[in-house]
């Protein structure tokens, strides 16, 4: 009876649109499940962004730049539905969303992760001020679930956010990387990991991942991959 009352007072809501869910374990309503389509082929062979046709190997961005991060995948395009889902997870603390998306990462990319055999899964860190405001790091939450499911270490604190860097909106990609580079560091007196998998929530220009890769390479890491919940399509 107590749980029936709690369910009435605090009904389970869709992690995207907040529609009250009637039953089932899925934290999304049927409509939002249909709207959130996982990215499939044809896709860029480096960043996994959708591309127009199979004859292309890379998206326009990846064909013009060189990267320290070798390759990675994102689950969904960063459209209006994922913006809602990420906002609810990131700023409203709806952890059921993070748990659901982490499970989807394992479902779709678990075999690939095992294939690249990372020594560690590293969540992109956030500055202590942002962590204090949000109460948690969304990338860390997802990374720990993925690591637990696959039996891979997630050494939180190895990759550090040392500065709360300046806003990025008016900077080009090179400027963003340079701006971010000074904000990351690797924990001192730690042996480097040979291969790592970086985890973040959103891939936009890739500047954040590249800034992390710079300090990891300097510390001795040789191969760097990434996994994100969603990726911008522009």
Image (spheres, rainbow, N blue to C red):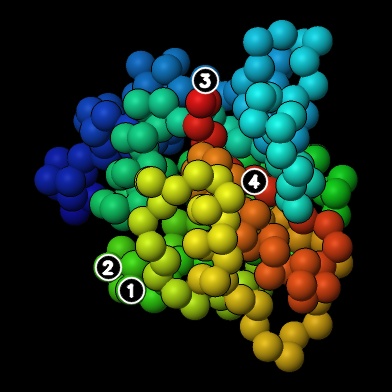
User: In the picture shown, does residue 36 fall above or below 128?
Assistant: above
- Front-most of residues 73 and 211: 211
**Residue occupying the point 41% across, 52% down:** 168
Q: Disc 2 and disc 4: Cα gap in Å? A: 25 Å
Q: Which of labels 1 and 3 is toward the front? A: 1
Q: Which residue is mark 2?
A: 133
Task: Quote the CA–CA distance across marks 1 and 3.
Answer: 34 Å
| Relative image position of residue 4 (x, y in whole percent) | 20, 44
Tell me the distance, in whole angstroms, between the alpha carbons under discs 2 and 1: 6 Å
Instruction: Please give the residue where the numbered disc 4 appears in the rendered image.
Output: 227
What distance separates the C-alpha of mark 3 from that of mark 4? 17 Å
Residue at point 76% right, 72% down?
Answer: 218
Which of 195 and 142 lies nearest the eye of the viewer? Answer: 195
* Residue at 58% over, 66% down: 181
Q: Quadrant of residue 197?
A: bottom right
According to the image, label 1 marks what residue? 129
Image-based side of 87 in relation to 226, left or right: left
Mark 4 residue element: strand
| Label 3 SS | loop
Q: Could you give the CA–CA distance between mark 3 and mark 2, rounded to whole angstroms?
A: 31 Å
Evaluate if marks 1 and 3 touch, with contact meaning CB atoms under 8 Å apart. no
Q: Earlier in the sequence, mark 1 or mark 3?
A: 3
Per the image, the residue denoted by label 3 is 37
User: Disc 2 or 4, which lies upstream in sequence?
Assistant: 2
Q: Nearer the viewer, residue 45 or 170?
A: 170
Question: Is label 3 in contact with label 4 (beta carbons under 8 Å)?
Answer: no
Residue 42 location, x and y as percent? 71, 15
Label 1 SS: helix
- Please indicate, yes or no, whether residue 223 appears anywhere in the rendered image: yes
Q: Earlier in the sequence, mark 3 or mark 2?
A: 3
- Label 2 close to label 1 by CB (< 8 Å): yes
């Amino acid at each position: 009876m107590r749980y029936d009352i709690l369910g009435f007072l605090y009904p389970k809501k869709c992690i995207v649109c907040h529609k009250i869910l009637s039953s089932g374990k899925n934290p999304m309503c049927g409509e939002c499940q249909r709207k959130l389509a996982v990215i499939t082929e044809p896709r860029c062979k480096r960043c996994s962004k959708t591309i127009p046709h199979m004859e292309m190997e890379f998206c326009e961005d990846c064909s013009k730049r060189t990267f320290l991060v070798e390759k990675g995948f994102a689950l969904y395009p960063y459209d209006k539905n994922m913006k809602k889902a990420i906002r609810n997870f990131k700023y409203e603390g709806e952890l059921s969303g993070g748990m659901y998306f982490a499970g989807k990462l394992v479902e779709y990319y678990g075999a690939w992760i095992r294939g690249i055999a990372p020594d560690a899964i590293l969540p992109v860190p956030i500055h202590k001020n942002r962590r204090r405001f949000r109460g948690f790091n969304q990338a860390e939450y997802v990374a720990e679930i993925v690591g637990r499911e696959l039996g891979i270490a997630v050494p939180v604190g190895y990759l550090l956010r040392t500065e709360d860097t300046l806003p990025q909106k008016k900077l080009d990609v090179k400027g963003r990387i340079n701006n971010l580079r000074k904000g990351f560091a690797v924990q001192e007196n730690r042996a480097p990991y040979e291969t790592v998998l970086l985890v973040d929530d959103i891939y936009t220009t890739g500047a954040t991942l590249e800034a992390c890769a710079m300090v990891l390479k300097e510390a001795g890491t040789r191969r760097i991959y990434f996994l994100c919940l969603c990726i911008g399509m522009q």
